[in-house]
Image (tube, grey):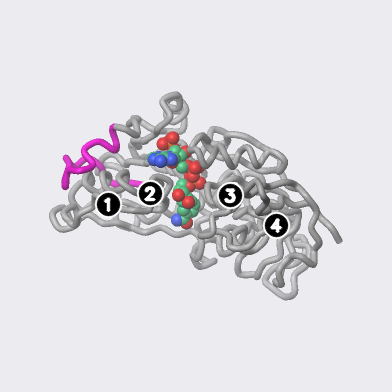
């Protein structure tokens, strides 16, 4: 049986993506066949579609690290045909055919049930970005962070992870300061719940100084590089930064141990990919209930698979504001 999928190939003109046909037998062995309804666009999808070997080693390939849909075939429990499920992370869309195909076939423990109270499309407005943002917030709350301790900084704030973090933190009562490189996005971020905005240039100033004036009660960092280093240098005594991304740089060239040994600050690593399924499920429940961000305000666009190539370029250039949901089924 054939089905439609976005296919990325290594051509004479570089890596190119187009909607084409694949066979069910092209999908890897797995326990559960899912008919995909919606997917989403993440930075990592654009890396996969542009030939980044750290993400995808073999082409032709179908990217899409997020998928929501309905179980069509299941070898054994816990899922049965007809169940609505979410698949994010693990190897989906990396070296396993991903959510930009009509079907995915994956191990059962890559799936979580779609939480009660959440519709499939909303799950993909959130996607891996929303899950990661929620994990960052949870990591900070686990250190004891409370609203009266001061401002919480979010970097890369108009990006997928950043904008969901702004919305959740503000919903939980925190005063959020957002760093953005987009001078035309200030009102948009304020509408999402940011109390104040800092430009990317200001957030990167004084990168060569070993310490800076303490300001933040907590940080959600999607950028890495000097952005994260400066955030560490401006944390209050004993405060923490949750680190999840590298759009700026994976290197911490200007970092020293001083913020750690003089102010007792903490660097918290956040990973949404290999996270145990039970934890993923708990976080999805939170996203469907007490932590639901402002989904309408977060959504940038609903697109088709045919439109993905142009959106890959936009997200790689840091030009997307908010979350992009991809109609599949
Ligand atoms: P997006 O591209 O949607 O957002 C990133 C944002 O960062 C941009 O919108 C822009 O926001 C800002 N930005 C872009 N380039 C630069 C730069 N050179 N310097 C400083 N800021 C920049 O990406 P996602 O939100 O999907 O992902 C963010 C990061 O988190 C990525 O590195 C991704 O790989 C990682 N990630 C990690 C996960 C994990 O499990 N650890 C899961 C999901 C994502 P603005 O213009 O507002 O500054």
Whole-percent x and y of residue 23? 81, 61
1 and 3 marks in contact (CB < 8 Å): no
Label 2, on which residue?
Answer: 249
Mark 1 CB near ligand 1 (8 Å cut): no
The earlier-in-sequence mark between 2 and 4 is: 4
Which span is picked out in magenta? 202-220
The quarter holding residue 79 reads bottom right
2 and 4 marks in contact (CB < 8 Å): no
Whole-percent x and y of residue 128? 54, 52
For residue 319, above or below residue 164? above
Q: Is residue 291 visible?
A: no
Nearer to us: label 4 or label 3: 3
Q: Residue at x 52, y 42 (%)?
A: 316
Label 1, on which residue?
Answer: 253
Q: Would residue 228 be counted in the magenta stretch?
A: no
Q: Is residue 102 left or right of residue 214?
A: right
Q: Is residue 35 left or right of residue 93?
A: right
Mark 2 CB near ligand 1 (8 Å cut): yes
- Distance from disc 2 to disc 4, alpha carbons, whole Å, reads 37 Å
């Amino acid at each position: 049986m054939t089905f439609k999928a976005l296919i990325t190939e290594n051509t004479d003109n570089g890596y190119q993506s187009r909607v084409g046909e694949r066979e069910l037998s092209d999908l890897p062995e797995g326990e559960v066949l899912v008919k995909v309804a919606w997917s989403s666009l993440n930075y990592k999808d654009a890396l996969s579609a542009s030939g980044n070997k750290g993400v995808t080693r073999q082409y032709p390939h179908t990217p899409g690290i997020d998928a929501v849909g309905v179980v069509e075939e299941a070898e054994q429990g816990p899922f049965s045909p007809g169940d609505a499920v979410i698949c994010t992370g693990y190897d989906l869309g990396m070296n396993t055919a991903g959510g930009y195909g009509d079907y995915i076939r994956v191990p059962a423990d890559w799936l979580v049930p779609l939480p009660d109270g959440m519709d499939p499309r909303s799950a993909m407005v959130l996607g891996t970005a929303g899950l990661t943002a929620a994990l960052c917030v949870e990591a900070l709350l686990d250190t004891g962070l409370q609203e009266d301790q001061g401002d919480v900084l979010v970097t890369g704030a108009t990006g997928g992870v950043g904008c969901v973090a702004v919305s959740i933190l503000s919903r939980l009562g925190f005063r959020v300061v957002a760093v953005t490189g987009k001078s035309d996005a200030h009102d948009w971020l304020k509408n999402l719940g940011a109390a104040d905005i800092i430009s990317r240039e200001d957030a990167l100033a004084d990168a060569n100084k070993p310490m800076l004036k303490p300001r933040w009660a907590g940080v959600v960092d999607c950028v890495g590089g000097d952005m994260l280093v400066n955030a560490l240098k401006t944390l209050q005594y004993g405060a923490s930064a949750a680190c999840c991304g590298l759009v700026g740089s994976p290197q911490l060239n200007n970092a020293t141990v001083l913020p750690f040994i003089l102010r007792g600050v903490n660097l918290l690593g956040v990973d949404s990919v290999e996270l145990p399924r039970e934890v993923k499920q708990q976080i999805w429940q939170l996203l469907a209930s007490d932590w639901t961000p402002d989904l309408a305000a977060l959504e940038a666009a609903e697109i088709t698979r045919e439109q993905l190539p142009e959106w890959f370029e936009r997200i790689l250039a840091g030009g997307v504001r908010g979350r992009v949901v991809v109609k599949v089924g």
